[in-house]
């Protein structure tokens, strides 16, 4: 690949991934072997197999899960696999209760304690020829982990439909082979995700050959204080939701790893137990991993997810080869819910210039981006040097609304977090001048500046506002990164209070970066204990020896328990997100600071019990780490800044910087990573406190 001409490489990542893979993964929405129309008799032909060998005597059922009425799970037809594993089911596709709503179709094949399963598509776009095996079972169990309830699979509309494409990334339901996205670069043999997937398929294969292994699997995947799974599919889903065992790295303490060695027919597989069993799918925009000028992205900084689950990502730098200096990024990216690049993306214009942590969707679906002006030092000497003083606005179709200079009103300076509240007001954290800009109703002509401290000397901010989140009362909570304080601003734009970094003698804020609100309006803060944001000076770096997370209660504005929470694999907390179960996810900017080394420890993400303790493992209380002391590590991850959770429960992360990085010469990573099915699904877009589908009634 390194010798391929640039124009061919560019064509490859534009066409091969965003077109061919989109057709393959999203084939359920078009033809894909469709042999029928809605409500007419149709025939499903398939084979139940293990390692390419047909399985006889499996009871095969075809089910429809109606996403417009999540309790509606219907049997459409059934059959029994013959000597060669073949089956045939004739059925009629019923209509949903809502107009134009079609169900997600699933095949389940059972014999004794074994259940193999596959998601075969949506309504009249579903496949007519399928293979059901261990691969499709693991793919379905991961992509639909948050929706598996016994033998039923049901949930919110967008989450369920989008999970069909995500499952196909892992396993092709038509052939039963490994999915093209998982099998090829930047995944394949470049990360351990394919090996983890194969180890999980071997776990299921062991169950197929010996029912005693099923019993061991059910025991191993029984949640603390909860009932055992009813079948293999539910066992896999339980493992996604509870992916780690204590005692790493001792094999004897992980029964799932031991089961993966009972019948290891799928290779390559993990040679040693992992810190977790989550699947981290890496996305670069094409079937490549090499960094060069034809990449889709360079230094993705943060993301926002729209109402249908499409993902918008900002970008720090212009793509360049390794070791070549990179100037301010000029792109806004959009991805399908299954990770493919959206046609027309990337989008340009509107004043985009080195966007940082700031990106948000307003209530109308418009995209706002904060232009921090990230650029390598040589770029500051060039005519196109970034001005670091604007936000950009795009329509939901990716058309720029803001001018070529962006919107600069309201004294914007080195903007970081850029968020919308539920009234459509846009809030911008000005890292460069210790202030916040409010853009009422998204009208830049009404923008005004709110000073959160003394007006600093030009170029020498002392507070450095960074993360912003909005509580239930519409107050903006602003993390002051350098001063280790929090500024609270009323909906009208008045500074209410500045919270100290200490409470009753305990350090509760230490170089904070991102923050997030839970469903009850409490504010969770990621304390990096290291970052001094470069806006423009960065002379007060911390030691990174005491990373933590703090929950501030909305009403009292005091830290819960009077101190910060630690553990769970926290290293350099940066981004933070609260899922639909009020579980708190923290995204680490690597295991060690840049230039400090060593760099051989993979990056991990951390997970904490939130205010809804009934959704946590039994016996846990607020702030207890759910993730192990290692965190959930993956070699697909680099230095993470932002992350968000989608309607399927996938955790989307940005590989913002490389692990072993030169911060002054093209430090950006070139990928985003999807942690499949790991979190409580969220109703998107995230504007203000999170809303679960359970609480919204959807």
Image (cartoon, grey):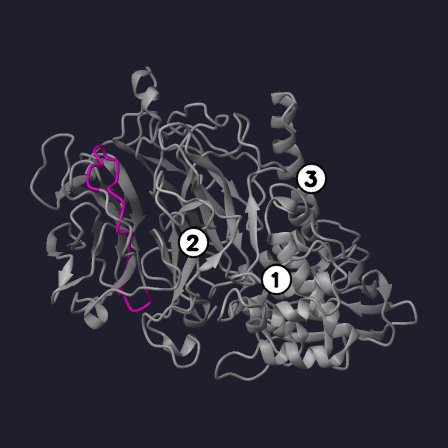
Circle 3 sits in a helix, a strand or a loop, which is it? helix
Marks 3/2: CA–CA distance: 27 Å
The stretch drawn in magenta includes residue 537: yes
**Left or right: 163 as drawn, with respect to 40:** left
- Residue 103 visible (yes or no): no
The magenta-colored residue range is 518-540
Circle 1 sits in a helix, a strand or a loop, which is it? loop
Marks 1/2: CA–CA distance: 27 Å
What residue did someone put label 3 on?
A: 20
> What's the mark number on residue 644?
2
Q: Earlier in the sequence, mark 1 or mark 2?
A: 1
Q: Nearer the viewer, residue 194 or 27?
A: 194
Circle 2 sits in a helix, a strand or a loop, which is it? strand
- Residue 128 visible (yes or no): yes
| Residue 164 in picture, x, y percent from top left | 64, 58
Q: Earlier in the sequence, mark 3 or mark 2?
A: 3
Marks 1/3: CA–CA distance: 26 Å
| Residue 655 in picture, x, y percent from top left | 46, 43
Residue at image x 50%, y 26%?
321
Label 1–label 2 contact, CB within 8 A: no
Look at the magenta stretch and give its main secondary structure: loop
């Amino acid at each position: 690949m390194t010798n391929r001409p640039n124009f061919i490489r560019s064509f490859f990542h534009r066409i091969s991934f965003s077109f061919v893979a989109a057709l393959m993964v999203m084939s359920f929405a078009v033809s894909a072997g469709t042999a029928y129309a809605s409500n007419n008799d149709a025939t499903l032909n398939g084979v139940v197999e293990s390692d390419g060998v047909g399985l006889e005597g499996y009871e095969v059922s075809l089910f429809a899960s109606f996403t417009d009425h999540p309790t509606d799970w219907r049997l459409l037809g059934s059959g029994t696999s013959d000597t060669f594993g073949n089956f045939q089911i004739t059925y009629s596709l019923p209509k949903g209760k809502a107009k134009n709503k079609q169900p997600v179709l699933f095949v389940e094949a059972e014999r004794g304690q074994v259940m193999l399963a596959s998601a075969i598509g949506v309504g009249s776009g579903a496949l007519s020829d399928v293979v059901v095996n261990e691969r499709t079972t693991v793919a379905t169990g991961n992509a639909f982990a948050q929706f598996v309830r016994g033998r039923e699979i049901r949930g919110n509309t967008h989450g369920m439909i989008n999970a069909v494409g995500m499952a196909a990334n892992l396993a092709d339901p038509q052939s039963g082979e490994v999915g093209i996205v998982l099998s090829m670069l930047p995944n394949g043999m470049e990360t351990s995700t394919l090996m983890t997937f194969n180890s999980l398929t071997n776990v299921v294969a062991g169950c197929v050959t010996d029912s005693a292994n099923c019993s061991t699997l059910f025991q191993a995947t029984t949640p603390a204080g909860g009932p055992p799974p009813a079948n293999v599919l539910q066992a896999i889903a339980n493992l996604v939701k509870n992916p780690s065992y204590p005692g790493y790295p001792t094999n004897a303490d992980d029964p799932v790893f031991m089961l993966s060695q009972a019948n290891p027919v799928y290779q390559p597989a993990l040679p040693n137990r992992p810190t977790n069993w989550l699947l981290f799918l890496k996305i670069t925009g094409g079937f490549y991993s090499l960094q060069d000028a034809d990449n889709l992205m360079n230094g993705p900084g943060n993301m926002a997810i729209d109402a249908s689950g499409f993902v918008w990502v900002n970008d720090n730098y212009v793509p360049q080869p390794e070791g070549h200096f990179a100037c301010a990024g000029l792109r806004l990216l959009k991805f399908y819910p299954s990770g493919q690049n959206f046609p027309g993306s990337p989008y340009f214009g509107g004043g985009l210039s080195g966007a940082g942590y700031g990106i948000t969707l307003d209530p109308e679906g418009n995209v706002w981006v904060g232009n921090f002006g990230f650029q390598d030092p040589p770029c500051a000497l060039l005519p196109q040097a970034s001005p670091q003083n604007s936000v950009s606005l795009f329509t939901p179709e990716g058309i720029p609304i803001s001018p070529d200079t962006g919107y600069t009103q309201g004294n914007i300076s080195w903007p970081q977090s850029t968020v919308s509240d539920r009234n459509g007001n846009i809030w911008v954290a000005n890292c460069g001048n210790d202030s916040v800009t409010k853009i009422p109703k998204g009208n830049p002509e009404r923008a005004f500046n709110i000073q959160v401290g003394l007006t600093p000397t030009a170029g020498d901010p002392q507070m450095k506002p960074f993360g912003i989140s909005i509580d239930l009362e519409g107050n903006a909570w602003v993390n002051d990164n350098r001063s280790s304080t929090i500024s609270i601003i009323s909906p009208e734009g008045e500074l209410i209070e500045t919270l100290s970094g200490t409470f009753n003698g305990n350090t509760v804020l230490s170089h904070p970066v991102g923050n997030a609100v839970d469903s009850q309006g409490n504010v969770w803060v990621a304390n990096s204990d290291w970052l001094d944001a470069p806006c423009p000076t960065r002379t007060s770096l911390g030691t990174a020896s005491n990373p933590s997370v703090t929950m501030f209660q909305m009403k009292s504005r005091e830290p819960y328990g009077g101190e910060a929470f630690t553990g769970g694999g926290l290293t350099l907390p940066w981004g933070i997100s609260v899922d639909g179960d009020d579980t708190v996810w923290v995204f680490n900017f690597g295991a060690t600071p840049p230039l400090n080394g060593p760099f051989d420890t993979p990056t991990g993400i951390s997970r904490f019990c939130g205010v809804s303790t009934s959704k946590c493992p039994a016996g846990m209380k607020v702030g207890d780490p759910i993730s192990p002391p290692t965190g959930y590590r993956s070699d697909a991850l680099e230095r993470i800044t932002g992350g968000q959770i989608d309607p399927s429960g996938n955790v989307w992360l940005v590989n913002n910087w490389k692990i072993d990085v030169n911060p002054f010469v093209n430090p950006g990573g070139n990928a985003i990573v999807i942690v499949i099915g790991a979190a409580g699904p969220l109703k998107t877009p995230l504007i203000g406190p999170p809303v679960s589908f359970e609480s919204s009634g959807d």
